[in-house]
């Protein structure tokens, strides 16, 4: 290894000079070359971009992978330039457990069949989550990370060089100022007395030396000024490129939103399909209960449809059977006890005369009858009665 003592000493001298200049500026003992307002705005804008990009990147990583240990592991794989191993998602793991449980309980039993259906949906949800994470990582996280590890490092490097050039320029200015002051002092004190010719010669020699020092300082100042201006232009061009970075990040943000919207739409559709499957099987498993139609037009509304209220069997009915009858609301009688107040959460339009239409935020009296589906209650509002869905109510104590 080459070891250049002269270069090491020179670099140490430059570092010491810059440190002295920086300290004097902080203490207010030395003048500082100020950048123009536009350049300062570019610097502030770049710093803001970097800070918020870091925060958005970190929080998006937390959103996509909440487990901190897994994030650290993925970070290490990335730094080692190795492929991250494929992992099973939480939804897929839950689907695996449900499928295994269904095998233990019996896939032909009602519980086992339901576990299989829910497990299959959870598996599809897990696959959708995997696709969303992969798409977001490529289209959103990678561009942000490339900016911080690429463009921003280049900008930071050039800014440090510019700061060093500014310190060198200010040091040259201070050196020239001192040289001119010494030259003026030497020129103001010559001894023209003939009795002291030796002092006059010494004074004239000192004045010439300081004049040479001034010329040298002026040359160094011109060189430092040229280097500072050149580096300032390079840094300015990089800082102005932040606008292009914003445009690129805006495009990536749109792609992230599209991926997120697609993911949630898939999840919603999967759950609607599952509700339909469970609704159809519910009638087979619980034939004496209310059959709910799972068609829905809004993700905020719970699907409900007209239903029949089971009543006690009559004499003409076979023993042990439940007769479904479309009773009118006036035939419903509240139990002796068990009524309570409920606040309506959403508007509900009655599908037939056996149901009670609801308005958001109104208070009604509700109660349950023996044999009714647990998803429904009987509601009363004045002289009006009818069935109401439980999911539209907030039961009050």
Image (cartoon, helix red, strand yellow):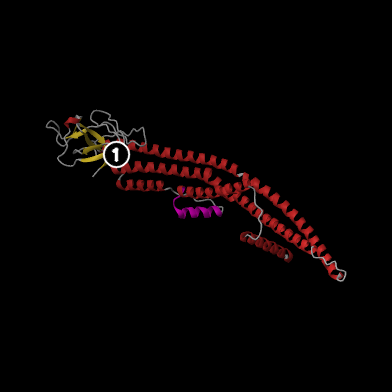
Q: Residue 304 at x, y = what percent?
A: 29, 34
Q: Per the image, is 67 magenta?
A: yes
Q: Residue 166 at x, y = what percent?
A: 67, 55
Q: Residue 24 at x, y = what percent?
A: 64, 61
Position of residue 174 in the picture relative to residue 140 (left or right): right
Name the residue: 50% across, 52% down. 74
Which residues are drawn in magenta? 64-79
Name the residue: 55% across, 48% down. 48
Q: Per the image, is 226 magenta?
A: no
Task: Decide if residue 288 is in sight here.
Answer: no
Name the residue: 49% across, 55% down. 72
Position of residue 32 in the picture relative to residue 397 (left or right): right
**Magenta portion: prevailing SS class:** helix
Residue farthest toward the top in the current orientation of the protein: 353
**In which quadrant of the rendered image does the C terminus lie?**
top left
Residue 300 picture quarter = top left
**In which quadrant of the rendered image does the N terminus lie?**
bottom right
In this figure, which residue is indicated by the disc labeled 1?
Answer: 391
Q: Residue 144 at x, y = what percent?
A: 55, 46
């Amino acid at each position: 290894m080459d070891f250049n003592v002269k270069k090491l000493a020179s670099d140490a001298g430059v570092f010491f000079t810059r440190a002295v200049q920086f300290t004097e500026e902080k203490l207010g003992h030395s003048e500082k070359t100020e950048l123009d307002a536009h350049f300062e705005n570019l610097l502030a804008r770049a710093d803001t971009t970097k800070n918020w990009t870091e925060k958005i990147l970190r929080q998006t990583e937390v959103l996509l992978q909440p487990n901190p240990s897994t994030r650290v592991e993925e970070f290490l794989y990335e730094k080692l330039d190795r492929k991250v191993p494929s992992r099973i998602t939480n939804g897929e793991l839950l689907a695996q457990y449900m499928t295994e449980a269904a095998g233990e309980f019996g896939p032909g039993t009602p519980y086992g069949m339901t576990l299989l259906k829910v497990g299959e949906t959870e598996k599809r949800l897990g696959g959708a989550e995997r696709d969303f994470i992969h798409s977001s990582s490529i289209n959103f996280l990678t561009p942000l990370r490339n900016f911080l590890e690429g463009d921003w490092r280049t900008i930071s490097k050039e800014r440090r060089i510019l700061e060093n050039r500014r310190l060198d320029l200010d040091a040259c200015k201070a050196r020239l100022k001192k040289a001119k002051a010494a030259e003026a002092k030497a020129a103001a004190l010559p001894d023209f007395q003939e009795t002291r010719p030796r002092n006059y010669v010494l004074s004239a020699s000192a004045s010439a030396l300081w004049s040479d020092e001034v010329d040298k300082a002026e040359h160094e100042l011109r060189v430092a000024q040229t280097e500072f201006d050149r580096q300032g232009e390079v840094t300015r061009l990089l800082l102005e490129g932040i606008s292009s970075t914003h445009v690129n990040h805006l495009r990536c943000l749109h792609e992230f939103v599209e991926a997120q919207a697609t993911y949630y739409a898939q999840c919603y559709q999967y759950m609607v399909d599952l509700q339909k499957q469970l609704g159809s099987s519910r009638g087979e498993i619980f034939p004496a209960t209310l059959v709910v139609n799972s068609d829905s037009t809004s993700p905020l509304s719970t699907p409900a449809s007209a239903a029949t209220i089971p009543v006690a069997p009559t004499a003409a009915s076979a023993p042990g059977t439940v007769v479904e009858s479309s009773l009118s609301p006036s035939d419903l009688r509240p139990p002796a006890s068990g009524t309570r107040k409920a606040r309506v959460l959403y508007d509900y339009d009655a599908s037939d005369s056996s149901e009670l239409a609801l308005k958001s935020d109104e208070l009604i009296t509700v109660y349950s009858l023996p044999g009714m589906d647990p998803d429904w209650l009987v509601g009363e509002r004045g002289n009006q009665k009818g069935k109401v869905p439980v999911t539209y109510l907030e039961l009050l104590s």
